[in-house]
Amino acid sequence: MSEGGSYLITGATGPVAEATIALLAKRGDMLLLTGRNEERLAELYRIYGAPGRVETLAADVTTGEGARAAAEAAISQFGRLDGLVHMVGGFHAGPVALTEDADYERLMRVNFLSAVKATRAVLPHLRSGGRLVFFGSPLAAEPLAALGGYAASKAALITWMRSLSHEVKHRGIHANAVILTMADTPQARKERPHVDFTQAVSPDLVARVVAFLTGTASDGLYGSLVPVMGLFGFSSALAGPGRAD
Ligand SMILES: NC(=O)c1ccc[n+]([C@@H]2O[C@H](COP(=O)([O-])OP(=O)(O)OC[C@H]3O[C@@H](n4cnc5c(N)ncnc54)[C@H](OP(=O)(O)O)[C@@H]3O)[C@@H](O)[C@H]2O)c1
């Protein structure tokens, strides 16, 4: 499906999602927005909510139960489901010696297994033209020091998505990923005051690519990675000050 379709947006409470929610809602899509943060969901509902058209549900899609509840709620609200925009994610920076098992486990759960669970939940409902949109990082292909856990979890996501795409493309289902450097959000500006955010990617630009990936303009894309890199000097900015040696 595409414009005017029905989409589950997971991780809708995150800082990148709002611009996508605004654009797809304006396009006339039916949206079910999920996350665990009920306060943020209520705020999103106040701005974008429309009974039977833009709804919210508190659910943790990193669990099978939460993912199934989200897919079933979308079906019961809208009568059909045309796609998943999976925006759940997590980040961790730290050298191997300072990264705990729990950090790796959390990264794999939020960045990889959540996508598996959300996809499993929506897949039985998708018809030909269905859309699955995931969010990766260039670090998966070009890992930097002290970002191994994050990079590995996004690499797992992307490798799995490409395999999934081969499985589902014969049903006419499109699985693709946005490869995002760093989004320019108020949260990121606060957390990373050393970064030049004029180089980062505005969530509005991400939203336009999601609109493309959930629209008929992307009918030819199966298992594609769509880079939305902005002007960001990725390695130098994240690796910190350079060393002469
Ligand atoms: N922001 C960036 O610069 C950037 C760069 C590259 C890739 N990406 C990817 O783009 C997507 C959207 O970015 P974002 O920054 O908006 O995402 P985010 O804030 O990292 O995560 C989005 C949502 O995921 C849910 N989540 C986080 N940890 C969780 C956990 N342990 N268990 C269950 N849910 C959890 C949270 O929702 P609840 O707390 O409401 O459940 C959160 O609002 C993510 O996949 C992210 O990894 C972002």
Image (cartoon, grey):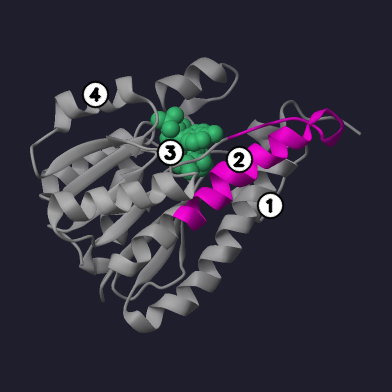
Q: Residue at x 22, y 68 (%)?
A: 216
Q: Nearer the viewer, mark 2 or mark 1?
A: 1
Q: Are marks 1 and 3 in contact (CB under 8 Å)?
A: no
Between the residue at mark 2 and the residue at mark 1, the CA separation in whole angstroms equals: 10 Å
For the residues labelled 3 and 2, the Cα–Cα distance comes to 31 Å
Mark earlier in primary sequence (3, 2): 3
Instruction: Name the secondary structure under disc 2.
Output: helix
Of circles 2 and 4, the one toward us is 4
Report the amino acid beneath label 4: Ala
**Upstream in the sequence, badge 1 or badge 4?**
4
Residue underneath mark 2: 234
Residue that mark 4 sits on? 42
**Amino acid type, callout 2:** Phe
Are the residues tagged 2 and 1 within 8 Å (C-beta)? yes
Q: CA distance from mark 1 to mark 3?
A: 30 Å
Magenta-highlighted residues: 91-117
- Which image quarter is the N terminus in? bottom left
| Cα gap from disc 4 to disc 3, whole angstroms | 16 Å
Q: Is residue 245 above or below residue 86?
A: above
